[in-house]
Amino acid sequence: MRIAFYSDNFYPELSGISDSIIITGKKLAGLGHSINFFVPSYSRKNYKFLDLPYKEINLGERIKITRLFSFPYPTGTAQSRLVIPTGLRSLLLKKFKPDLIHSHLIAGVGLEALLDSKILKIPMVGTNHTPISEFVRYTPVKWKWFQKLAQRYDVWYYNHCRFVSSPSTPVLSEMKSLGFNKPSHPVSNPVEIELFKKDYDKKKLKKKYGLSDFTLIYCGRLAKEKHIDLIIRAAAELKNEIPDLSIIISGTGSEEKNLKELAKKLNISEKIKIFGYIKEKEEYVRLYKASDLFLMLGTAETQSIVMMQAMTTGLPVIGVKAWGLPDYIYKENGILIEPNDLNALKEKILFLYKNKEIRESLGEGGKKFVQGFTPEKIAKAWEDIYSAVLKNTI
């Protein structure tokens, strides 16, 4: 098959969506399919922001990347781009001769996908990676009518698809309650399990990074909806009860300055290691292996790839009862708390600090759980879905 992926997020933007579609695209290419990514162009500044060379990423044979002219616009990644949809890119798409379009977001590139699908009469499937009602809460526009409009647009868009997935059930359920009526079911993002299996000496890693015996870790975008400030506040209130506490925060984003200022204000800066953007995935593995507990407190998560990666390394997790996280956190691999509940967060951190055996048991549970989400299995799931769409059996 020849498959066109459309996405408003792509390399070099720091994005779980970008990581996911690149991994899936590469595995589909490995199965013999041809992939063309239609994605925004990024400026030299975007590459420099992450200290990356200003050149196109090489994803191997059978994969092409088509960059669409774009403008910068403000989001939590500080890198996002806006493509103005015109339908003219259908001329580029026509040369690729795709069998199917897979749209991963609904902004400019997503609308371009819809236009190109209609113009060339090519079937389109979609993946909704974002709980739109939660996401718009963190945009500059605070009007209630804007949230309702965004939800209606979300449903309108995905009702033009032949099939729609999301990494978790709640996003699809909300869409259905608002009028979404197309075939759908959850499909997980892929997790690179083999990469995160490598073993390291935890004590040596802690010494290398200057970490204490009990280390909390968060990896990902530094954005308001991630609620990373709660980790800092909890650590500040627990530093007497857990004297050997340290925190790793790895990532970049619009909240970095605010988080550093909060840590300084709460007199907890010496306990926190902020690593920024990390180029090499192996370095993420080492950071996970040096840690003892992963925290994901984001209230707009459809899955959280970094959390799944943490499970792969044997880390227990604490997450919140919001959107997709309960689909992936069970009593066998982690603990769920209510969103924005600082007291519950402190209580569970302290509980796991005092109970090493439970931490280890949850970590083993996580390692078993993620085995169902290998890139090979996810690519095969999509191959079956694409075939069903083209055969009109879905």
Image: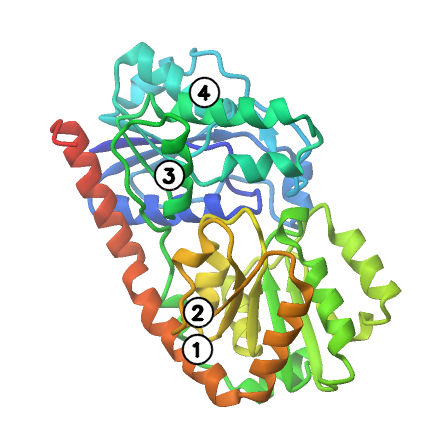
Q: Judging from the image, what secondary structure is the residue with disc 1 in? A: helix
Q: Residue at x 37, y 39 (%)?
A: 172
State the residue position of label 3. Answer: 172
**C-alpha gap between disc 1 and disc 3:** 29 Å
Quadrant, the C terminus: top left
Report the amino acid beneath label 2: Met
Q: Earlier in the sequence, mark 1 or mark 2?
A: 2
Q: Indicate left or right for 221 with 264 as reference.
A: left
Q: Secondary structure at mark 3?
A: helix
- Residue 128 found in image quarter: top left
Camera-side residue: 326 or 295?
A: 326
Residue 356 picture location, percent across and down? 52, 88
The disc at residue 311 is 2
State the separation of the CA atoms marked 1 and 4: 41 Å
Between 43 and 305, the residue placed more toward the observer is: 305
In the rendering, at what x and y percent does residue 282 appear? 50, 67
Comes first in the chain, label 2 or label 3 = 3
Residue 177 vertical position relative to residue 28 in the rendered view, above or below: above
Residue 363, disc? 1
Marks 3 and 4, Cα distance to the nearest angstrom? 20 Å
Q: CA distance from mark 2 to mark 4?
A: 35 Å
Closer-to-camera residue (102/344):
344
| Vertical position of residue 49 compared to residue 182: above or below | below
Residue bearing the label numbered 4: 111
Q: Residue at x 76, y 80 (%)?
A: 239
> Which residue type does callout 3 highlight?
Leu
Whichever of labels 2 and 4 marks the residue nearer the N terminus, that label is 4
Q: Residue at x 58, y 24 (%)?
A: 70
Identified by mark 1, the residue type is: Gly
Q: Name the mark nearer the viewer: 3 or 4.
A: 3
